[in-house]
Image (cartoon, helix red, strand yellow):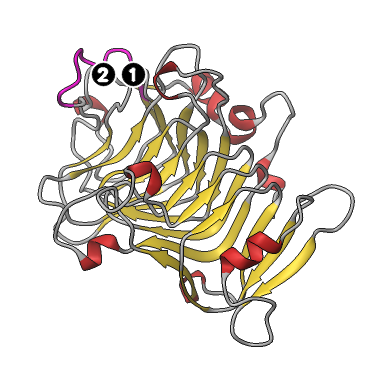
């Protein structure tokens, strides 16, 4: 990933590895970056990546066998933002070939937000990663952009060939993110659920989520799942070329209950070439739209994430 000098390699595991803990490996990484190779196993810890150019690479061919997991929740910490298993604040982060989970819901009957990954670094890439949780699995966010705080720097993130699981608002925040060829899987919840809760807070902030060539699946019996609801007034979510299961609610999009003013009319919710039993353009919420081919082009990965530096995350392997 880094240009110039090859980054240092650090190993994690129980067999002739440098460290037994992922956090220890991150602590040992220089500011110039490091490739952290993680042997198969379960690593029960909270990890903070606050350095640039850190790569977490699971060894082997099965992401399910390299597991980073913890069970914090909003109730047991300072809130949702503090509950993640993995925190990424450093730029140019990469994760591949592993599972990152928050298993709070497996050990408690008390509902609470419980984040698996919180990302606020720029140019982050997740490739062949499984993200597991229930409510608020993935916090794909920016830096100081919520509610108009300053200075606001929108952060770019790219998720490709990933599996993301949860039930309520399980992909949320205000990053500028693309989900490419990912499976977005809904698990049971008593009141249905929502795939996204994007939180763009004003028209000038250029955050948003794009799902392209994804597949929306669910556990048997799961129904009434919405593509998203607006966490903030200008929530922006686009689904393109996505296969949608029958669990997707016909209206597609839902209002944020309890908001002081309706948000759907200021949100940008759109689809392009949705397919499958959950694709139902005629029944969609009236404020959403179907994109033309020309309109959809600006949401293609390279155009949407390029930024001023011309970043192309598809080249990051």
Marks 1 and 2, how far apart at CA: 5 Å
Q: Is residue 260 magenta?
A: yes
Residue closest to the eye, 270 or 256: 256
Say few, some or many: other residues with alpha carbon within 10 Å of mark 2 (under 14 / 14 to 19 / 20 or more). many
Residue 156, labelled with which disc? none
User: In the rendered image, which residue does mark 1 sit on?
Assistant: 267
Kindly indicate the quadrant of the structure image that contains residue 202: top left
Quarter of the rendering containing residue 252: top left
Q: Is residue 234 left or right of 110 when viewed as pictured?
A: right
Q: Position of residue 129 (x, y in %)?
A: 51, 60
Segment colored magenta: 257-269
Q: The C terminus is located in which quarter?
A: bottom right
Q: Is mark 1 on a helix, strand or loop?
A: loop
Give 117 or 160, whichever is nearer the viewer.
117
* For the residues bearing labels 1 and 2, Cβ distance under 8 angstroms: yes
Q: Residue at x 20, y 25 (%)?
A: 255
Q: Is 227 contained in the magenta span?
A: no
Q: Which residue is drawn at 68% across and 45% down?
A: 92
Q: Give the SS element for disc 2.
A: loop
Residue at figure coordinates x 27%, y 13% from the top left: 265
**Residue at the extreme bottom of the image, as rendered:** 15
Q: Is the magenta stretch mostly helix, strand or loop?
A: loop
**Image coordinates for residue 173, horizontal then vertical, percent:** 41, 34
Q: Mark 2 points at which residue?
A: 264
Left or right: residue 149 compared with residue 90: left
Q: In this view, does 70 lie to the left or right of 27?
A: left
> In the image, residue 101 lies at what x, y percent?
40, 62
> Image height check: is 276 above or below 131?
above
Q: Residue at x 49, y 26 (%)?
A: 144
Is residue 157 positioned above or below 109 on the image? Answer: above
């Amino acid at each position: 990933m880094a240009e110039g000098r090859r980054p240092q390699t650090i190993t994690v595991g129980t067999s002739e590895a440098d460290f037994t803990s992922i956090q220890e490996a991150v602590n040992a990484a220089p500011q110039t970056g490091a490739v952290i190779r993680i042997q198969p196993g379960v690593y029960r810890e909270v990890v903070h990546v606050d350095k640039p150019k850190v790569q977490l690479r699971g060894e082997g061919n099965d992401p399910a066998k390299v597991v980073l997991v913890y069970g914090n929740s909003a109730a047991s910490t300072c809130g949702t933002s503090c509950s993640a298993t993995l925190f990424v604040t450093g730029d140019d982060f990469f994760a591949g070939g592993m599972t990152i989970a928050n298993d709070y819901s497996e050990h408690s009957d008390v509902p609470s937000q419980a984040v698996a990954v919180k990302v606020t670094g720029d140019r982050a890439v997740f490739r062949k990663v499984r993200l597991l949780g229930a409510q608020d699995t993935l916090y794909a966010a920016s830096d100081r952009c919520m509610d108009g705080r300053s200075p606001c720097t929108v952060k770019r993130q790219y998720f490709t060939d990933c599996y993301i699981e949860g039930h309520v608002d399980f992909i949320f925040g205000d990053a500028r993110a693309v989900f490419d060829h990912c499976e977005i899987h809904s698990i049971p919840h008593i009141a249905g659920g929502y795939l996204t809760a994007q939180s763009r807070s004003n028209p000038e902030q250029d955050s948003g989520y794009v799902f392209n060539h994804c597949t929306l699946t669910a556990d048997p019996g799961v129904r009434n799942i919405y593509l998203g609801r607006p966490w903030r007034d200008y929530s922006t979510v686009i689904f393109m070329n996505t296969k949608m299961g029958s669990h997707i609610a016909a209206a597609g999009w839902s209002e944020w209950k309890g908001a002081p003013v309706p948000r759907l009319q200021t949100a940008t919710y759109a689809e392009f070439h949705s397919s499958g039993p959950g694709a139902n353009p005629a029944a969609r919420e009236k404020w959403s739209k179907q994109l033309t081919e020309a309109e959809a082009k600006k949401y293609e990965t390279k155009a949407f994430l390029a930024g001023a530096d011309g970043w192309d995350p598809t080249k990051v392997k």
